[in-house]
Amino acid sequence: MSIAIVTDSAAYLTPAQLKRYAITALPITVILGAHQYPESDLSATNFYDYLKSDQPLPTTAQVSLGQIETAYDDLVSQGVTQIISIHLSSGITSFMDNLRAFCQTYTKAEVYPIDSLLASAGEANLCLLAGRLIEAGYDAPAIAHALLTLRDAQQVYFAVDSLRHLARTGRLSNRSAMVGSLLNIKPLLTFDDAGKIVAIDKERTMRRAFQYMENHLAADLKQVDYPLLATIIDANNPELAQQWETHLAAQFPQVRFNRSQLGPAISVHTGEKTMGLFWQQDWQEF
């Protein structure tokens, strides 16, 4: 019995991570005007340059079931009998619903579809834990159960420069919060239990938004009895992300910190300069 991992490009796993656990990452399509690009082929520089232009705002197209079937078939041809398929939150795309329906008819391997209820680090950590558990000899049902346990303890907060992009693409669930875009503030958002993006507060500056996130991390640390991994996430804002990491690592030496980013497929909805903080039980210690 051989187990493989499939995910999508919104996990933003590094080439080294993909290679380490033989993870198949299928690209989400980013549409810039008349041109379509697999996210993995679109540089951040080209994307953000386009975003700043006067051209039609970009959109995305989810991974197709044709891509999924081809990837699964390829893995089966290599001897894979079970597939852990971990993907972008069902709260912001219909892909997971389509995938679950497809998996009911796919008979060449057992497929375990996992809804990350998030993107970026939340999705990536599930993939990395799955890889570690496969190496440790766990079977697919046990891995799927562990992934859901890890997922259900995740916390994420992020701040966007403007709600314009989220409002335009329909990814913001509580639209009444759009008043924030009129007040020149930093809307604070999270993913709810259904994996939908919701506005929860607003601050006047990114510094105050950061303090809000830091306070929530500090409060959570007082309640948990397991080691945390916290990830600073940015959308083309690496200098500020480094400042956040340096500060947080000094304030919370008991937490393991790392960095991730929002690439074009997610930044289409959040816009440039988005900043976020995500944490959960450390998958390396799970």
Image (cartoon, grey):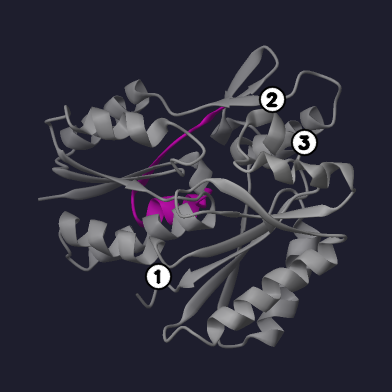
Residue pointed to by mark 3: 164
Viewer-side residue, 80 vs 186: 186
In the figure, is residue 137 to the left or right of 260?
Answer: left
Q: In the image, 278: left or right of 134?
A: right
Reply yes or no: does residue 26 show up in magenta. yes
Kind of residue at badge 2: Pro
Marks 2,3: beta carbons within 8 A:
no
Residue 283 tag number: 1
- Residue to which mark 2 is pinned: 58
Q: Is residue 51 above or below residue 111?
A: above
Alpha-carbon span between mark 2 and mark 3:
13 Å
Magenta-drawn segment: 12-29
Residue 162: tell me if it is visible: no
| 135, above or below 42, in the image | below
Q: Secondary structure at mark 3?
A: helix
Closer to the camera: disc 2 or disc 3? 3
Alpha carbon separation for disc pair 3 and 1: 34 Å
As helix, strand or loop, the secondary structure at mark 2 comes to: loop
In the image, what residue occupies the spot 39% across and 73% down? 284
**Residue 121 spot, x, y in % from top left:** 52, 57
Query: Is residue 156 positioned above or below 119 on the image?
Result: below
Spatial separation of the CA atoms under disc 2 and disc 1? 34 Å
Task: Work out whether mark 2 precedes mark 3 in sequence or the reverse, and give the earlier one.
Answer: 2
Q: Residue at x 77, y 36 (%)?
A: 164
Query: What is the quadrant of the C terminus in the image?
Result: bottom left
- Mark sitting earlier along the chain (3/1): 3
